Amino acid sequence: MITRRNVLRAGLALPLAGASGAAAIAQSASASAWLYSHELGPGAFRDDGNGHWTETTPTGAPWSFQEMERNRSYITLRDASRGMWVRLWPSYGELRQEPSTVWRRWVSGRWVAADALPPLIDYQIRLAYFIPSDRAPTPYYEDKIATLMWFVSEIYRQSLQARGYKARNLPLLMRGGKPAVALIRAPKRAAYYNNAPNYENSTLPQLARISDDIPAWVGNPDKQLLIVFAETYGEEPAAVEWHGTLALGSHHSASGGIGVFSSWVLRDDLCARTVAEQRAWFFDNTPIKDHGAMSYQRPNAPRHFFIEDGFGAVAHELGHALGLPHDTRQVDREIMAQGFRHIHWNFADPPQPEKGGMFSDENVRILMSSRYLATDLDMHDLTPPSLNVRIVGARLDTRPATVTIEVDASDDRGLRAAEFVCVQKDSVVGGRWLSGTRQTFREQFSIDAALAGKVEIDTIVTDIGGNYTLKRAAWPR
């Protein structure tokens, strides 16, 4: 059957009434890309060719729409999950929110060629090397970062693919068959970022200052996942690693996050240019003069301690950027605790990750809700789950303490996983897979030690689109 839509897709001309604005109307009748202006920046609508449209807002948030009407003057779209209607005209857009039938003027916009729109989120991890104005890049930094990320990717593969999950390898943005590393020439000196010589308590300010000077062309952590190596550490002797050391990760959205790391991990005596050479260094006891490793706590620590601290920290903080909390129930095994400091076992011959670092089952469920790792998500599902939680009972004076939580979770397309985190313990305490569009249940879990006073539980729920909702409940209420 040949419909108006089929004819338009075939590129055949349709008769149009009137001469005024004929070019704009003709374009709107066959268009698939609409660009608009907003006080926060540009936004866009794009058609996938099957009547499904995606809006990318100025903040990077994506919303899903279905085409409801197309005529010579405008296209009408509807987001059923929000009851939101949009009408795209040649020079402006209109909105209405159900149950209202009244349209209101929204933004100025225009039909454009598809390649004129901002790029869609591609779910490829951006790598960057941050160089203050008074520093120079370490030689072969691209090769070293590629080597480091091979080992980080292998840690994720062992926790996911080797345990039977259908997961992607870490999807690094590539160029010429190699991981692409953006070189950032920062505008200020290293001391501005690391607060030298007063390094103490500079971690969060350093993260903020580095983040502020990451150019837009590298990526936006609200829209993409960034891993940044910063040449901001001090060279003088240090009891733990290097002065000004930094390792932090932050989850921004289902599509975005950032991990920032001091690039002492790229030093010639710690990071090799090849995987084969680096693997041997994981078992090397050569002392690093005048520096102590976090897990060694004495000067002249053996080389492999620094490598585990550095490479493992990238895996750990990337976990935070992907939405993972700490899990201290098996403190020396869990990557999101201190297990990342024991990853030489992960690269033994044969690998023995059960002795080294792994992600817990609860954190694996969250990783398998990630748009960067899972292969079976509904990428058109852009609406996060609805979640209500309350603690209905607790025994905080016993060992172990226990908490019972009631969860009411729903999603327009399908739920995926739940995870529970005790705020006072800074640790995961439970979790489960979810299914269907609504689940209401109670779950009791143990907390290792007795707690005094108030206890708070964060509940994380994900859906089949990789969306992520967090709610906190307290006892006593």
Image (spheres, rainbow, N blue to C red):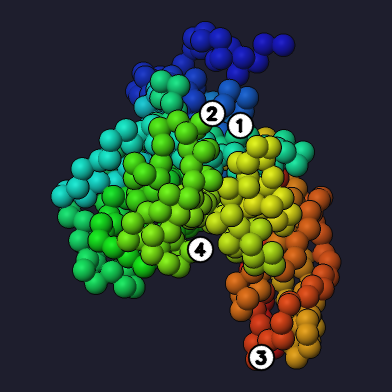
- The image's mark for residue 47 is 2
The residue tagged 1 is 52
Amino acid type shown at disc 1 = His
Decide: few, some or many residues near mark 2? Use Cα within 10 Å; few <14, some 14-19, many ≥20.
some
Which mark's residue is nearer the viewer, 1 or 4? 4
The residue tagged 3 is 452
Q: Is residue 201 visible?
A: yes
Which part of the image, by quadrant, shows the C terminus? bottom right
Q: Position of residue 183 (x, y in %)?
A: 29, 38
Q: Position of residue 409 (x, y in %)?
A: 75, 61
Q: Sequence order check: which comes first, mark 1 or mark 4?
A: 1
Is residue 84 or residue 367 the one in the foreground?
Answer: 367
Whether label 2 touches label 1, CB < 8 Å: yes
Amino acid type shown at disc 4 = Ser
Q: Position of residue 88 (x, y in %)?
A: 47, 36
Which mark's residue is nearer the viewer, 3 or 1? 3
Q: Sequence order check: which comes first, mark 3 or mark 1?
A: 1
Q: In terms of secondary structure, where does tag 4 sit?
A: loop
Amino acid type shown at disc 2 = Asp
Q: In terms of secondary structure, where does tag 3 sit?
A: loop
Is residue 233 or residue 426 the one in the foreground?
Answer: 233
- The image's mark for residue 295 is 4
* Residue plotted at (34% across, 23% down): 20
100 relative position to 221: left or right: right
* Residue plotted at (84% across, 66% down): 441
